[in-house]
Amino acid sequence: MMKTKTKDNNKWIKAIAAMAIIIAVLISGAFLLKKANSVYTENSYPLKYEKEIDAASKKYGVDKALIYGVIKTESNFVPDARSSAGALGLMQLMPDTFEWLQTYYKDENDYTFEDLADPAINIDYGAELLSILSKRYENEETMLCAYNGGLGNVDKWLDNKDYSDDGKTLKVVPFPETDNYRKLVEQNKSIYEQLYFKK
């Protein structure tokens, strides 16, 4: 009788020990998974070019998370990225846009278009463009459409009742690429806010 009780007790002890091991493995696995996910996210959304972005953000009054969102979307942090359309650098500026920006503020610097492969120069001009667009348009989504699709197109869309009810916001973006672009920048900006710039 005593041996049966001892056997039963041993079975329970082994079962409890096995469950404790399983729980410990699950907890440590969940911790490692969370850590791996965190490392992956931070590697996917790095804080590269902090000094340059911080300087441009202060100089032009543009949200750092927005600058990061644009860079992530445009070039994924490749400083000399070049698009098939001819845009260059981290914030993918076009030659005519760069030329316009240089005359807009009567820039004293004698930069060439190729200088936009320099992160500091590219971020400065890209943030300047975002600042100009933010003053011209009342909301960020419209501003981002102009950054991608051009001011002329966005102005026409805002004047068209099919695309805008109030002449200030777009209810429809007729270029699918531009529509996807603004959504992706906003998504990337939001991730940067959550990861690094929580208020």
Image (cartoon, rainbow, N blue to C red):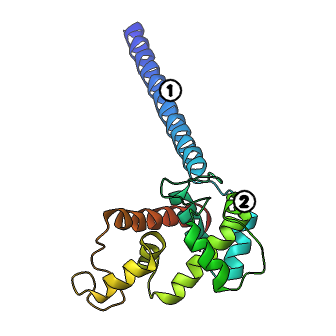
Please name the residue shown 46% across and 21% down the image: 13
User: Looking at this view, is 40 or 114 the one in front?
Assistant: 114
User: Looking at this view, is 29 or 9 the one in front?
Assistant: 29
Residue 68 makes an appearance in the image = yes
**As drawn, 114 above or below 171:** above
CA neighbours of label 2 inside 10 A, class few (<14), some (14 to 19), many (20+): some
Mark 2 lies on residue: 118
Q: Is residue 28 left or right of residue 105?
A: left
* Residue 58 image point, x, y percent: 71, 79
* Residue 6 image point, x, y percent: 44, 13
**As drawn, 138 above or below 128:** below
Q: Please, what is the three-letter code of the amino acid marked with disc 2?
A: Asp
Mark 1 lies on residue: 21
Which mark, by number, is residue 157?
A: none
Please name the residue shown 68% across and 59% down the image: 114
Q: Secondary structure at mark 1?
A: helix
Disc nearer the start of the sequence (1/2):
1
**As drawn, 188 above or below 12:** below
Q: Quadrant of residue 93?
A: bottom right
Please name the residue shown 49% across and 88% down the image: 136
User: Looking at this view, is 191 or 26 the one in front?
Assistant: 191
In this view, the residue farthest toward the left is 162
Q: Quadrant of the N terminus?
A: top left
